[in-house]
Image: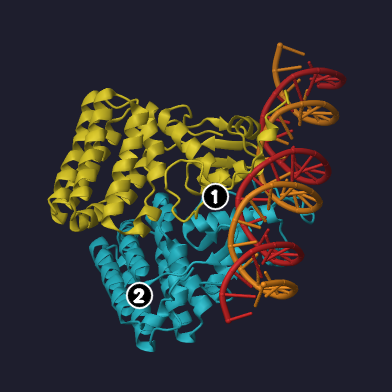
Chain colours: A cyan, B yellow, C red, D orange
Amino acid sequence: MATTAKTARKSVPAGDVTEGKNAGDGALASAADRVSESILQGIRSGSFVPGQHLLEPDLTRRLGISRGSLREALKHLAAAGIVTLNRFRGAYISTLDRKSVLDLLDTLEPLARLGARLAAENCGTDAQRKRMQVAAANIDAATKERNRGLYLDRRRQFYDAMIDIGGNMELARAMPLSRTDLFRAQVETIQTERQRMLHASGYAKITKAIVENDPVAADKAVKKHFDGTRKTINELPPHAFPTLEI
Amino acid sequence: MATTAKTARKSVPAGDVTEGKNAGDGALASAADRVSESILQGIRSGSFVPGQHLLEPDLTRRLGISRGSLREALKHLAAAGIVTLNRFRGAYISTLDRKSVLDLLDTLEPLARLGARLAAENCGTDAQRKRMQVAAANIDAATKERNRGLYLDRRRQFYDAMIDIGGNMELARAMPLSRTDLFRAQVETIQTERQRMLHASGYAKITKAIVENDPVAADKAVKKHFDGTRKTINELPPHAFPTLEI
DNA sequence: CACACGAAATCGTCGAACGATATTGACGGA
DNA sequence: TCCGTCAATATCGTTCGACGATTTCGTGTG
């Protein structure tokens, strides 16, 4: 229906469709959406670091969009907790202290467990099983490559696959995955190799339970995964969590 | 000046930091936030019904804000699933079918249980206990009054109190409470008196467990509350869930 | 060296404009 | 009469320029 996209002039109002867009009503990508995704991608890849000041004139120039669209995107990201807006002082990439990270884990865990249970119940076709296994293998490969941006992308794809297969779209909307990307970006550079590997192995266990249609095991695997993450967070040195002055 | 009140463009840019966005209504928030809250309030009170078409020119006139701010708010509400944006066709108040409602309940339940557990663990002062009891009593009163708008407002205040006391602010961000308001608005007019009363009594049980610092009982009370809600949803006639054409 | 003052930078909001698309209604032909 | 085609209208998505408000910072003065 909305797949016309015959006109491809320059600077047209968002004439392209986004198929794999996460969390949404399957709408088209507006300029603001593209900006949001660009900033999120920048956080995952490391070109934006927590605490960084985002200047409107700079971003509008680099992204080639108007200030209105940029502000729309920043507003959206602020609502998601990715950036912090300070009145008349600008937008900053949010920083998470240890308590916020642990709170975030507490919040994300029950949702992830629900998602894993649903995926385990609904993983019926070979295509679905394949998708989960590929997603898990991709995470593993990115971990071994020590490519943080790639790892965060694929971790996101893993959750997307799980939620897709589970079939509960409300879950996709509620899961604070972008905010999790933020804290992953903060800690990924600091945790030890062993912690990194241990964490990555968790996805394989979750995947195994899902493709075997074992919701109880999937739930348990996610729980263990989060317990391990909490342990890692508690073991991190204080300097992993910048004190947010201001 | 007989044309419009354009001279009133005093551009009142709030006066405080906007990090606490659920700081109530008030004119302290940004223009877009005020519009969002106004639309949400309209949904709760019934002046906006699911499926209703939102015209930009009409809203800008009625709310006295610019089109840019309105669009910002609509974008925000669309991200939260409250309104649906159709390219070149406008914004509509979202409608939820039965599956979406059940999915939403599945998603909300573990978060609400977490919130109740945390509140039960952290409810230490008399002020906190008082706040929970007042919130529960207010819900009860609104239910007995058969005032839907008031009920939805106070239900929201109940959850806010619970989350506040629990002390996990990530939870506040993740809980799809506004979307729940949407389905409550859809359902509240149709369910039977018995269902309504039964539902309201659940808040009292949750409150009791919280003030008695019994996390296990609080978790259990929320679970029962949601089980009852699911039962109600499944008993509703099909016409409670509009087929979303367009 | 401390403090006041003004310029620069930045943000929040508004209004107008242009292009693009969906909807609608009129018109003509089979 | 019915149906397809085409133009007019309504509405949306985006951009640009402008103004007021506020913070920040450099500079001059005591």
Q: Amino acid at mark 2?
A: Ala
Neighbor class of circle 2 (other Cα within 10 Å; few <14, some 14-19, many 20+) is some
Neighbor class of circle 1 (other Cα within 10 Å; few <14, some 14-19, many 20+) is few
Res. A26 mark: 1
Q: Earlier in the sequence, mark 2 or mark 1?
A: 1
Identify the secondary structure beneath mark 2.
helix
Question: On what subunit does the disc labeled 1 rest?
Answer: A
Q: B36 or A135, which is in the foreground?
A: B36
Quarter of the image for residue B136 reads: top left
Q: Residue at x 18, y 44 (%)?
A: B207
Quadrant where the N terminus of chain B is found in the figure: top right
Alpha-carbon span between mark 2 and mark 1: 29 Å
Position of residue B219 in the picture relative to residue A126 (left or right): left
Q: Amino acid at mark 1?
A: Gly
Q: Residue at x 33, y 60 (%)?
A: A107
Position of residue B12 in the picture relative to residue A152 (left or right): right
Q: Is residue B184 above or below residue A127?
A: above
Quadrant where the C terminus of chain B is found in the figure: top right
Res. A204 mark: 2
Quarter of the image for residue C28 reads: top right
Q: Is residue B101 above or below residue A197?
A: above
